[in-house]
Image (cartoon, coloured by chain):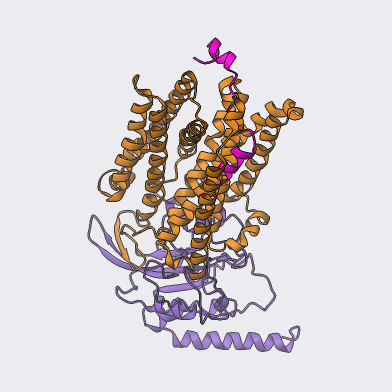
Chain colours: A orange, B purple
Amino acid sequence: MRDTFQRIEERSFYALVVFGLLLVMVGLGAVYYMEEHGHAVTGMNNQVVWGMPHVFAIFLITAASGVLNVASIGSVFGKPVYKARAPLSGLLSLTMLAGGLMVLMLDLGRPDRVIIAATHYNLTSVFAWNAILYPGLFGIVGVYIWTMMDHSMKAYSKIAGFSAFIWRFILTTGTGSIFGFLVARQAYQSAVLAPMFIVMSFAWGLAVFLLVQSSMYLWNGVALPPPIQRRMTRLLGIFIAGALYFVLVYHMTNLYFSRQEAFEHFILLDGGIFPILFWGGFVLLGSILPLALLLHPELGGRRATILASLLVIFGALCHLYVFIIGGEVYPLDIFPGFSAASTFGDGVVGQYAPSLPEFLLGIGGLALAFVATVIGVRILRFMPQDDFTILTGGKNVH
Amino acid sequence: MSDKTPNQSRRAFVATAGAAAAGVMIAPGVHLIEVASARPAGEAASRTVRWGMLVDVTKCQEGCTACVSACNKENALETALPQNQAPQWIRKVDLKDKSTGRALSLPMMCQHCEKPPCVDVCPTGASFKRADGIVLVDRHICIGCRYCMMACPYKARSFVHETLENQNPEVPRGKGCVEACTMCVHRVDKGQQPACVQACGAEGHAAILFGDLNDGASEIAKRIRSVATSQVRADLQLNPGVRYQGI
């Protein structure tokens, strides 16, 4: 049975790898084009300095942290159902982090100088912390997977799992703080952003996990035992609600401050694409609908889980687009009490139209995560190995 | 006099004579003499100096862009890129008081903060503040992450979106790096005025005064002591080196 779990039909495996690698190559081609011509060929400008690549990169990095939650529940809190899924959770964390970092680094103005980011640290910079936190996560999760897969290392699994648990909390705090520490922008400068990103990472990471897990079971022609299915979908529902709660608190706080009213009006009501993506993409399609699919007593099956997970990921990208791009296009209030006009976009909403190369770079990052995952689950035993005697005993399931 | 080498004496004489000539040529009331002290090559910027500017908004004319043109020419910033991708180290901002309707126009550039957020967030230390208060970007270690652009409260920084040609050798720039007003550090180090200050004076407005904020005897320090001036986004407590009068 377990051998069946392991088996991915060979031809399909190579087809998937080739398909993924092609997308990675296309992404790299886009990078070459952008580097050769400069960022002038992108939609980014001096107002919107972080564009579509950052939406993909921050999604991948946030989800990479959140997906480790599955492992943490297993190893730190000792839940067998999750423990069986810890290796896959670790693998997804590594592959998504790799994809996210690929996008982030190749979107730099000088990606050829990435070694400088690893050799010159300004410790007051959240980015510099991340330059330590990201490779650190690679190392810790790598060791964690090793301790889970090598029986001689089993004794260290608990401590490695605990280290990963702590490390990813710090890492996502760092991701949220990239924005939270920006003093002058209406959209950011809030301490709530760090915990908000942590909770969002739980939801996005679990959505990716469930999607991959469902695909793997489907591929192998095996059904995920309903109790496990129910437990994990319920957890995703809780995380979605948690993320929604933090977003609500963030906007409520802003709405309370007079100086933030115009910005909130822009994001929530009259900002063109941004309110549409916020309400339609993040709130409705990315949160309410998945919640209904997951928690409705007559739904919550495999198909509903896959659909809900896809919707959560779609909602996440919508939310990040609103959060990052919407936050940037809104003009800085440099002279409070005055209306401003200049040749540099003062006082007006900035323009941003994502270009094809930016999309392709983002897709390239997703593809890297995809290919690495496909290869990983093929060559090592990442398929969840449930102890069915425990499951049928029902003690640790409900 | 006897304890100085001939070279130093000659340099001092040329500097003083040059400053005197400039002082005569520029509009009355504008004294440039305090900046006419070139820093010898190889000597580090002094911590005792804090270069700054005072912009008299009441003298700045709406529609006049002499400072902008001078900056673009001095730093070879001209480009065919669209306005939102073109570098703008200094820009004219037209303001209107929302409650009273009072209109004013002023130049906006890097404010050379004492506590610059761009320096705080720069991961590699490429954004840095020189000992004399001028905030710069080290083009050799800027990786082009643009975090400083997100952090700057004044929107003072630009990203180089294209391959550059015909650069001013004294103002090295680089594709994929972030840049901003250098306060014409290459001129200041030679004892000259920043290009915008000179152009504004030549235009007859003399709305920008440049000098050492730390030197109590300097014109800028005297003016800041005697008239009401303001810092843009003073609430952030960044203590910018650029002050405004008449906002």
Residue B11 % position (x, y): 65, 86
In this picture, residue A385 sits left or right of residue B241: right
Figure quadrant of the C terminus of chain B: bottom left
Depth order, front residue of B153/B219: B153
Q: Quadrant of residue B49?
A: bottom right
Residue A135 % position (x, y): 64, 46
Residue A233 % position (x, y): 44, 25
Depth order, front residue of B156/B246: B156
Vertical comparison of A311 with B80: above or below: above
**Residue B175 within the magenta-colored segment of the rendering:** no
Figure quadrant of the N terminus of chain B: bottom right
**Residue A378 within the magenta-colored segment of the rendering:** yes
Residue at image coords 52%, 48%? A15
Residue A240 % position (x, y): 41, 31
What is the tally of numbered marks visible in this picture?
A: 0
Q: Quadrant of residue A143?
A: top right
Residue at image coords 52%, 31%? A220
Read off the magenta span: A372-398
